[in-house]
Amino acid sequence: MTSVDMEADVAEVLLSEDEIRAKVLELGRQISDDYAGRQLTLVSVLKGSLPFMADLMRSITIPVRIDLMEVSSYGGITTESSGLVRILKDLSSSIEGSDVLLVEDIIDTGLTLNYLLRYLRGKNPASLRICTLLDKPARRLVEIPVDYIGFTIPDRFVVGYGLDYGELYRNLRFVGVLRPEVYSG
């Protein structure tokens, strides 16, 4: 059972609000430079990447369009990916001929992202690249070419800044390690 005090359920703060803010600004500058003179379409994968996407798009100085997708690869309140991916909400606009940057909150096994990349390539974008706030390479099952990485993190169960457990903790302003007793009991 989750306590009323979400912060009490966090064993340690892995990334502070200030560290995240500084990294998002740095990524925004790099993306703006790399796509200078072009229009970029950011595609966010709901729900976890929403805070990251909102902050990232505000730090990008070139024209951007945004679109949202929602996929399901987890079975309820589990900590393990099932490997099965379902598209719950598809893009609302065509990306054919567009420069597309897929914005993710975290990449762990890579199974969901691998499926999404194949799916989006089928929509004929001019380019398709990936930006993730968090990379957890220790759990990777599929090799994914990630173009922009905020932070590489250890294999720990993290919540906050969009990341959840049982749909909770997304609104924490930092990324923290969830106490094992919260998700194993």
Image (cartoon, rainbow, N blue to C red):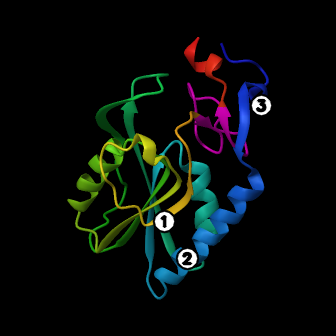
Instruction: Decide if residue 77 is on the left or right side of residue 7.
Output: left
On the image, numbered disc 2 is attached to which residue? 30
Q: Which residues are magenta?
A: 158-177
On the image, numbered disc 3 is attached to which residue? 7
Please tell me which of labels 3 and 2 falls first in the chain.
3
Instruction: Decide if residue 146 is on the left or right side of residue 158.
Output: left
- Amino acid tagged 2: Gln
Which residue is outermost to the bottom? 37
On the image, numbered disc 1 is attached to which residue? 148
Picture coordinates of residue 126 (x, y %)? 28, 75
Please tell me which of labels 1 and 2 falls first in the chain.
2
Answer above or below: position of 2 versus 63.
above
Few, some or many residues within 10 Å of mark 3 (<14, 14–19, 20+): some
Q: CA distance from mark 1 to mark 2?
A: 9 Å
- Amino acid tagged 1: Tyr
Picture coordinates of residue 163 (x, y %)? 58, 39
Please tell me which of labels 3 and 1 falls first in the chain.
3
At 56% across and 16% down in the image, what residue appears? 184
| Magenta highlight: main SS | loop
